Amino acid sequence: MKINFHGAAQTVTGSQHLLEINGFRLLLDCGLYQGRRADTYERNLNFKFDPRNIDAVILSHAHIDHVGNLPNLVRQGYAGPVYATKASADLAKLMIADSGRIQESDAEYVNKKRAQKGEPSIEPLYTQADAEETAQYFKGVGYGESFEPIQGVVANFHEAGHILGSASVALDIEEKGKKIRFWFSGDIGRYRMPLLRDPVLPDKADILLMESTYGDKSHNDPEQAFIEFRDVAKRTLERGGKLIIPAFAVGRTQEIVLYLNQLMTGREIPSVPVYVDSPLAVRATGIFKAHPECFDDETNRFVQEARHPALDFKNLTYVQTVDESKALNERKESMVIISASGMAETGRVVHHIRNNIENPKNTICIVSWQAPETLGRRLADRELEVRIFGETYKRKCDVATIGGLSGHAGQNLLMEYALRLKGQARQTFLVHGEEKQALTLIEKLKENGMDKVVYPSLHSSVEI
C-alpha cells in the first residue's frame, strides 16, 4: 500500500490523498486548493496523477476544499464512482455547480485584464456544465453501510460531526495476505454543536490520517457562544434595530437559523421577521431539510416539542429574488438578515451592510473567522470607517463578534481523537493544517506517548 499526499499537506485546503492498493488507485477527496489567485489556477488545473487511472473516489464531506476539483477530474478523463454519504452527495452536487459558475465568472474577469495587456485568454478551471456531468458519478451510501470501492478494500462511513453528511472513512484493507485498517478522519467536528450529531471517534486502526487545523488551541464552549449570540440579538431587536449576520451558506447559516428558531420559540428574544438572503444558502437549506437523519437528538426533541421543523418557523423567509433582497433595505422595522458571504467580501450581504452600517440601532454580528483585508475583518476590528463599493462609510452601528462556533475540533478533541489509537496505530499522518498548528499537536501527542506521528510534505509518498 502506498499513500500519496497530493493536497492539504502542510496547508489547510485542496484535500487529495491517493492510495495505491492491490494495483488499484483510490482517491480520498478531490478538493480545490484555495489561496492567491496567481497560485491557485495552475495548481488546481494540473493533477500530479492521471485522472484516467483513478479507479474510485471517496469523499469525506461537501466543503469545496474537499470536493471542488471533482469536475476538473472528470473533465480530464475520470469516469468512475464517487462515493459519499447520501447527504454529502446531494450537498456536493450543489457545491460544485455553484463553484462551476464562479470558475466561469473568475475566468471572464481575468480574461478582461489579460486582454488589456495583450495576453492570451484562459479557460475556466471547469464550468457549470462540467459540474452537471460530474453529478452522474455520485453514489450515496448510508453511515455504517459497507461498500467495496476497489478490490480488497471494504469501506464504511462514520459520523464526523463537521457539516451535514460529513464522515470519517474507515477502510479495511487486505493486500498480499495482510489485513490492516486505515482511518481517514476527514474534517472532525465538535461536541454539542447545533443540528448535527457528535463526531464518532476511531475504535481501532493501524494507520490514521487526521486533520490538524486547530492543533495549537482549543475552542470556547459552544454553549457560551449561544448565550453571547442570544444577548446580542436581544439587545439589538429590543431597541428596534436590524441584526445583520454575514454567514457561510452551508453550515453556519443553518446553525444560526436553528438558534433563532429556538430563541423565538422560547420567547427569549423578540419575535421579528428573519430573512435568509443567499441563493446558495436557500438551496443548501433545502438539502438540510431533506436529511433529518443527520440531525442530533437535541434537534429532533426540539422539533417534536415545538411541533414545527428545525429550519422553518413562522417568522422565517427564504429570500428568492434580487428584488426581494433589495426590498429589505427599504424597510425600517426591526429584523434579522442572514446573508452570504461569510467574510462579507461578496454577495448580497455587502449591500445589507452598506445600507445599515450608519444606523446606531443596528448590529453587524460576526460569527466566524475573518481573513485579513476582508470587509468582515475590518468590521471585526471595529474600524470607524470602511470602504464599500469604492465609497467610504462611517460605522455607527454596533459590531459583535461571537467566538466558539468553529465547525472544526480544537486541540483537546484532536488529542482525544488520536489518543484513542495510542498503542494501536502504527503510524499517524497529520494533514489539513499549517505548520505551527500541526507541529504543536505533534509535540502534545509525543508528550502523551504517541510518537509515530508524521507531518508529510506536499506530493510526498509513503509505503506502508
Image: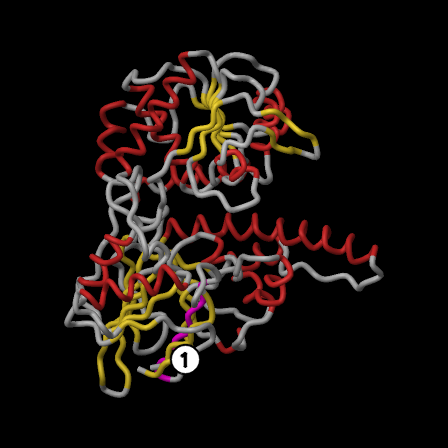
- Residue 335 lies, with reference to residue 72, above or below; the image says above
The foreground one among 153 and 325 is 325
Q: Residues within 10 Å of mark 1 (few under 14, many from 20)?
A: some
Image quarter of residue 172 = bottom left
Secondary structure mostly seen in the magenta stretch: strand
User: In this figure, which residue is indicated by the disc labeled 1?
Assistant: 461
**What amino acid is at disc 1?**
Ser
Q: Is residue 228 left or right of residue 4?
A: left
Measured as percent of width and height from the top left, residue 151 is found at: 34, 78
Extreme-front residue of the structure: 384
Residue 267, given in percent of the width and then of the height, sits at 30, 16
> How is the rendered protein coloured?
secondary structure
Q: Quadrant of the N terminus?
A: bottom left
At x 58%, y 27%, the residue is 352
Quadrant containing the C terminus in the rendered view: bottom left
Residue at the limit of the structure toward the left, as seen here: 423
Magenta segment range? Answer: 15-22
Instruction: Judge by depth and name the residue closer to the eye, 436 or 418.
Output: 436
Considering depth in this image, is 416 or 133 the residue closer to the camera? Answer: 416
Q: Is residue 262 above or below residue 108?
A: above
Query: Residue at position x 23%, y 58% from top?
Result: 415
Name the residue nearer the viewer: 391 or 367: 391
